[in-house]
Image (cartoon, rainbow, N blue to C red):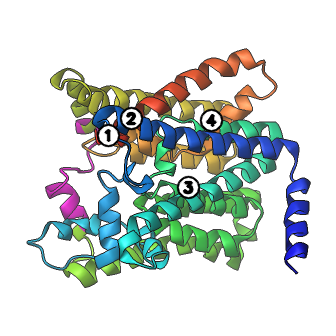
Amino acid sequence: MLETVNINITQQFRNISKTAKIALLIFIVAKILVFTVGYLAIYKQTGTFPASITNVFNHWDAPHYTDIAKNWYETDPTLDAYNFIVFFPLYPILIRLFTISLTYINASALIVSNICSIIVFLYLYKLAKHEFNEGVAVKAVLFLSIFPTAYFFSAPYTESLFFALTIASFYYARKGKWSLAGPLGLLASLTRLAGLLLLPVLIIEYYHQKGWKLKKTDLKISWTFLTLAGFLIYLAINNQVTGNPFTFMDIEATHWYNRLDPVTGLINAYHSITGYGYPDNIGLGIAPLAFAIFGLLMVSLSLWKRLRPSYIAYTFLSWSLAVSTSWWISVPRYIMAMFPMFILIGLLLNNKRPVYAIPIIIISGALLCYFTAIFAIGWWAF
């Protein structure tokens, strides 16, 4: 029996195209690079290697997710953990489901993130190949893997889970499988606020497939509204824990000083360039401004290359959400959520000479190593 299973697995691997294997190799090498850089950065900073792989990227928001996984949301407003209500629940739930012993909950968080990152690779490749060809798909995987903030795919953060659910939802929407696209959208909006962007985007994709003819509307469109359900569940949790469904907004403003105010965000980022010393001037000023401009460029290029309306809409809405707050400190990470830009870059560089891609690979890879290193040693890196 075991021999039969091994033969089947081997046969399935052989059936994977050479191009897909190249994409998988790129993904694996990039992930090994991230952990290696993290380890070396900690060694250089402390003189010793981290005792466990779970300690490499367990910084900033990461412990908050594991705290929720262990204790759920805090109901006592006098305790700091009460502020963790701003973090959406699906990722902590999955961490708890993967946890046999609370002693190893950090390992569970890392496992969830890295398993989800494999799903990200799979569906980005499948989606790009469906839209264009294998060459574009490989390049999309390459540039996502070496994006300057791609280390979050290896860290106990929501990036891997959110990307996996969002891209998978897009993929099944493109295939017209709305009964899969909708529930995946629900889970995405139960992972991050940005999951709500899937509601208008899936509706755009639905009507694009219908030739923009309202008379062709059928019950399948109802699946798209499940994306709203995830957010409503989160509001219900807010209400159950704090007595107010919108407590997360108040805490964002009072505890994290983050409001819906993009103008102030731009001003704060600009003044952080000269108002802080290294490395905060990079993390709080230079990088957020640079990535905001880069994101806007990607929006413009998606219009120029006339991507599908749903891709253009998602790219624009993701960029708008990333720069919508009064603090742009996480813009480089949120800009990465504009996943159609990786397909776009793959399209722009498809059939081009390597000389066009090499400078981008070098610059992006160098920034990935730099930001990975400073995040691993506990400095602010989005």
| Marker disc for residue 143 | 4
Quadrant in which the C terminus appears = top left
For disc 1, the marked residue is 377
Between the residue at mark 1 and the residue at mark 4, the CA separation in whole angstroms equals 25 Å
Is mark 1 in CB contact (under 8 Å) with mark 2? yes
Measuring from the top left, give residue 41's x and y in whole percent. 38, 35
The stretch drawn in magenta includes residue 256: yes
The quadrant of the rendering that contains the N terminus is bottom right
Amino acid found under the numbered disc labelled 2: Ala
Query: What secondary structure is marked by label 3?
Result: helix
On screen, residue 174 above or below 357:
below
Disc nearer the start of the sequence (4/2): 2
> In this view of the protein, which residue sits in the foreground, 42 or 163?
42
Q: Earlier in the sequence, mark 1 or mark 2?
A: 2
Residue at position x 78%, y 18% in the image: 353
Residue 219 visible, this orientation: yes
